[in-house]
C-alpha cells in the first residue's frame, strides 16, 4: 500500500504553457464523492416547476456540466428535451462525451465548450437554464442573470445551486495556510475570492432587478455529509477547491506534499472522525429557481 506522501506525489495536473483553471480538473477525483455532489442537483430539480411547451420538447442548457453524468439526470426528468451541457474544462468535456446521444424519450444530450462568464443564449431560446455547483467559479456571475433570463421563453426557468460554505474550516484553513509566511509568496493570488457567492437575499435582489425574473424561489440547506475513508475532507477538497494550489506547486512536488500534509493535519483537528470512522462534514448550499416573465 502506498504511503500518503507517495499518493500526494502522484497527483497529476495537466501540463502546458499558459494553463488556466479550465485545465486543472480531474474528473475521476471529482466523482469520488458523486453521491453527495449529485443530491443537491436532485433537490434543485424537484423544485423546478412545469416548463413551457416547445415541440418536440424543451430546450435545456446545463451550465458547468462537469463530467456529464449529472446532465443525464436532466434527461431522466425531461426525456424529450434537447439538452446541451457547457463547460470550459477539456478534461470534463472529454469525460462527458460518453454521455452524449439520443435519449429514451426522443430527446438528445450533447456537450460544448463555453466560458460561462461570456455565454449568452439567443433571446427566448431555452425553456430551462440550469447550473449545478459551477457559478461559484464565475466571478461576477450575478451580472449574467439578465442575459440568461432573456434567453428563456416566457415562463421558462433559470435554476442553480452554489456552495455556501466558504466560511467553513475546510476553506478558511486552506486560505490561512496559503497566507502563512512559508506559502504566501508562492500562493499569493492563487486562491479565489473568499466570498464568491451571494447570500440568499443577495440572489433574490440580483434575480428580480431590471430585466429579471417574475418570480423567485430561494432557499438554503446544510447537508450533514457523512464521509468515510482516510482524511475524507481532504479527499473532497482535492477534487475542487485545492486544484489551484496543486497547480501552483506542480513544479515543486515536495512543496506540494508539505502543503497537503499541513492542511491534512489542520483538517483532522477541525473534522475529527467519529464512531465507525465516519467524519461529519457540514456543507451549506444555496438554491435559486427563477421564472421568466
Image (cartoon, helix red, strand yellow):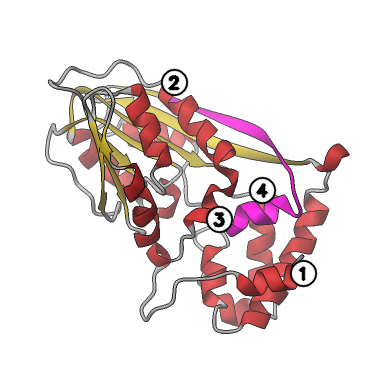
Residue 223 in the magenta stretch? The answer is: yes
Few, some or many C-alpha atoms within 10 Å of disc 2 (few <14, some 14-19, many ≥20)?
Answer: few
Is the residue under label 3 in contact with that under label 2 (CB below 8 Å)?
no
Residue 81 in the magenta stretch? The answer is: no
Rendered location of residue 191, percent (x, y): 53, 65
Q: Nearer the viewer, mark 2 or mark 3?
A: 3
SS assignment at label 1: loop
The residue where tag 1 is placed is: 3
Which quadrant of the structure image shows residue 11? bottom right
The residue where tag 4 is placed is: 168
Few, some or many C-alpha atoms within 10 Å of disc 1 (few <14, some 14-19, many ≥20)?
Answer: few
Look at the image and tell me in which quarter the C terminus lies.
top left
SS assignment at label 4: loop
| Marking on residue 29 | 3
Few, some or many C-alpha atoms within 10 Å of disc 3 (few <14, some 14-19, many ≥20)?
Answer: some
Q: Is residue 240 visible?
A: no
Instruction: Give the residue drawn at x 13%, y 31%.
Output: 124
Q: Nearer the viewer, mark 4 or mark 1?
A: 1
Which quadrant of the structure image shows residue 207? top left
Rendered location of residue 65, percent (x, y): 37, 45
Q: CA distance from mark 2 to mark 4?
A: 27 Å
Q: CA distance from mark 2 to mark 1?
A: 43 Å
The residue where tag 2 is placed is: 46
Q: CA distance from mark 3 to mark 4?
A: 21 Å
Q: CA distance from mark 3 to mark 1?
A: 18 Å
Q: Nearer the viewer, mark 2 or mark 4?
A: 2
151, above or below 218, in the image: below
Q: CA distance from mark 2 to mark 3?
A: 27 Å
Magenta-drawn segment: 218-238
Amino acid at each position: 500500500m502506498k504511503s500518503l506522501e507517495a499518493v500526494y506525489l502522484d497527483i497529476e495536473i495537466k501540463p502546458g504553457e499558459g494553463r488556466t483553471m479550465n485545465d486543472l480538473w480531474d474528473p475521476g477525483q471529482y466523482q469520488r464523492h458523486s453521491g453527495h455532489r449529485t443530491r443537491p442537483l436532485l433537490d434543485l430539480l424537484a423544485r423546478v416547476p412545469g416548463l413551457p411547451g416547445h415541440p418536440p420538447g424543451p430546450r435545456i442548457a446545463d451550465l458547468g456540466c462537469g463530467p456529464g453524468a449529472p446532465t443525464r439526470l436532466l434527461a431522466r426528468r425531461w426525456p424529450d428535451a434537447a439538452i446541451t451541457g457547457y463547460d470550459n474544462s477539456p478534461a470534463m468535456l472529454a469525460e462527458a462525451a460518453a454521455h452524449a446521444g439520443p435519449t429514451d424519450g426522443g430527446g438528445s444530450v450533447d456537450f460544448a465548450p463555453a466560458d460561462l462568464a461570456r455565454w449568452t443564449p439567443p433571446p427566448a431560446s431555452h425553456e430551462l437554464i440550469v447550473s449545478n455547483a459551477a457559478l461559484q467559479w464565475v466571478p461576477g456571475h450575478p451580472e449574467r442573470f439578465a442575459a440568461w433570463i432573456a434567453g428563456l421563453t416566457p415562463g421558462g426557468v433559470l435554476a442553480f445551486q452554489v456552495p455556501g460554505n466558504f466560511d467553513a474550516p475546510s476553506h478558511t484553513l486552506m486560505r490561512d495556510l496559503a497566507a502563512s509566511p512559508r506559502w504566501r509568496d508562492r500562493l499569493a493570488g492563487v486562491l479565489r475570492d473568499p466570498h464568491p457567492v451571494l447570500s440568499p437575499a443577495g440572489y433574490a435582489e440580483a434575480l428580480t432587478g431590471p430585466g429579471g425574473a417574475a418570480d423567485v424561489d430561494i432557499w438554503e440547506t446544510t447537508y450533514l455529509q457523512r464521509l468515510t475513508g482516510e482524511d475524507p475532507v481532504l479527499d473532497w477538497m482535492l477534487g475542487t477547491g485545492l486544484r489551484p494550489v496543486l497547480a501552483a506547486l506542480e513544479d515543486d512536488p515536495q512543496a506540494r506534499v508539505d502543503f497537503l500534509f499541513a492542511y491534512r493535519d489542520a483538517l483532522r483537528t477541525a473534522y475529527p472522525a467519529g464512531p465507525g470512522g465516519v467524519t461529519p462534514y457540514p456543507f451549506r448550499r444555496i438554491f435559486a429557481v427563477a421564472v421568466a416573465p
